[in-house]
Amino acid sequence: MSSSSFDTLVLGAGLVGSSVSFHLSKMQSGTVAVLDADLSGRLSSSELNAGGARATWDQPINVILAKDSIDFFRSHREISAYRDCGYLWMFRKDQWQQGIARAEMIQKKHKIDIHVLSVKEIQEKTPFIDKSDDLEGGTFSPTDGLFNPNTVKNYFREESKKQNVQFLEGHRIKSVSVLNDESIEVECELIPPKNESELKEYYERDPGQPQKSSGETRKIRAKQIVNCTGAWASKIAKLIGYDSPVWAVRRQVSIFDTRGFDFSHYGMMVDPSGVYFHPEATNILGGYADPDEPKGWNLNYDGESFFQEKIWSALYERSTKFEELRHLTGWGGLYEMTPDKTAIIGRVEKFKNVFECHGFSGRGAMQSYAAGRGIAELIATGKYQSIDLNCLNGSRFQKNELVKEGLHI
Ligand SMILES: Cc1cc2nc3c(=O)[nH]c(=O)nc-3n(C[C@H](O)[C@H](O)[C@H](O)COP(=O)(O)OP(=O)(O)OC[C@H]3O[C@@H](n4cnc5c(N)ncnc54)[C@H](O)[C@@H]3O)c2cc1C
């Protein structure tokens, strides 16, 4: 068994954990390591998301976290490939009043550019929307857009490594002992590289239970740890010794061929059915958050049947161009949800040296930059410097100080 020690140990090397290490290393705040069971992140949400980024939310704190992160993506386009292609939401009659009210609120309260569109204006902007009998109007936010979460995550990691941050591959957290306010011991199973199906089995199981492994373990000491384990954060919280109300739920997306229709210059669109879609190279990526999906760590993709029943059935009703779509592939990934659908960021109340940053409820990629910076500031200086994130502390659920977010897909 090997052992080592660091000032900060980040648990989970997705976009969020990598952002925490990026900011900590920029602040030169002691020695840092980031561990992950699978650094390639094949089944992590950072790998399996849709790459959407928008600052149009109900809650001011969600607007600010997304806006700051998008500003970073925009000023680093060569890394993020950020494209201000906008978000177009379409509404039916029964949804329209709420759609207008939200747009007005976002414009007035957050000073974000968002246009209210009539059906005619939707069709001028997107002429292929030629089945519109059920539409009442739409909203368009031109500065929202799409980016490449993978290249951003790799950038965070590469910059961290330049400052001597260590990324620990094949480290599966097995147990965590908070020894005192200045020392935590994390025991990991060292797992050999796995193929995707082995990895899947493993990600759907409880880390507290024995797993097939090399039998080798490693103990790592740290002054403080940060729980950035995404959809697995409640399991890791339990190992640390606290409860987190975050849960995992599967979200599926399909990739399909448009059979000659060039969709590449459009942005993100949200149909009144809840189906969202955007260009993905020469194809389209379409997703749907099924409200009947049970909670749990299910990473399966239902394939053609998901595409036909959930995606195509809705898009067929929107455009003649969508009548002959062809399913290519797709995947199931995990959202990490909280009761108020806003992230949990801050120090865990029960401990002086345990921090957490997870529960982004479907918007962790677009908030990763600012969220990671917040945690790094808290660790390095004892308080938030750029954005006051105190309202996102996990203790809000006991205090009933919820930050309820409504505008999500
Ligand atoms: C289909 C889909 C579409 C989405 N679309 C968008 C979108 O358009 N825009 C957006 O902003 N967000 C979107 N999201 C959400 C976004 O992907 C997540 O909020 C974000 O990636 C969370 O990042 P993370 O680093 O917290 O988690 P992850 O990327 O999941 O990283 C957590 C890491 O923890 C590691 N880990 C877990 N348990 C252990 C353990 N026991 N030992 C060691 N390591 C462990 C995992 O290996 C993983 O690498 C989407 C998600 C899905 C599934």
Image (tube, rainbow, N blue to C red):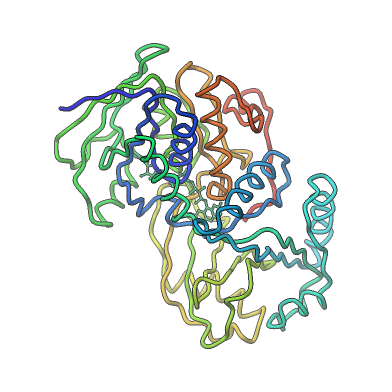
Q: Residue at x 39, y 46 (%)?
A: 158
Q: Residue at x 78, y 79 (%)?
A: 124
- 155 versus 183 height, above or below: below
Number of numbered callouts drawn: 0
- Residue 65: where, in percent of width, then height? 64, 42
- 21 versus 348 height, above or below: below
Residue 383 appears left or right of 208: right
Residue 233 appears left or right of 85: left
Q: Nearer the viewer, residue 212 or 216?
A: 216
- Residue 351: where, in percent of width, then height? 47, 17
Residue 348 appears left or right of 390: left
Q: Residue at x 45, y 43 (%)?
A: 231
Residue farthest top in this picture? 180
- Residue 16: where, in percent of width, then height? 48, 42
Image quarter of the N terminus: top left
Q: Residue at x 70, y 49 (%)?
A: 57
Q: Nearer the viewer, residue 80 or 59?
A: 80
- 98 versus 2 height, above or below: below
Image quarter of the C terminus: bottom right
- Residue 266: where, in percent of width, then height? 63, 73
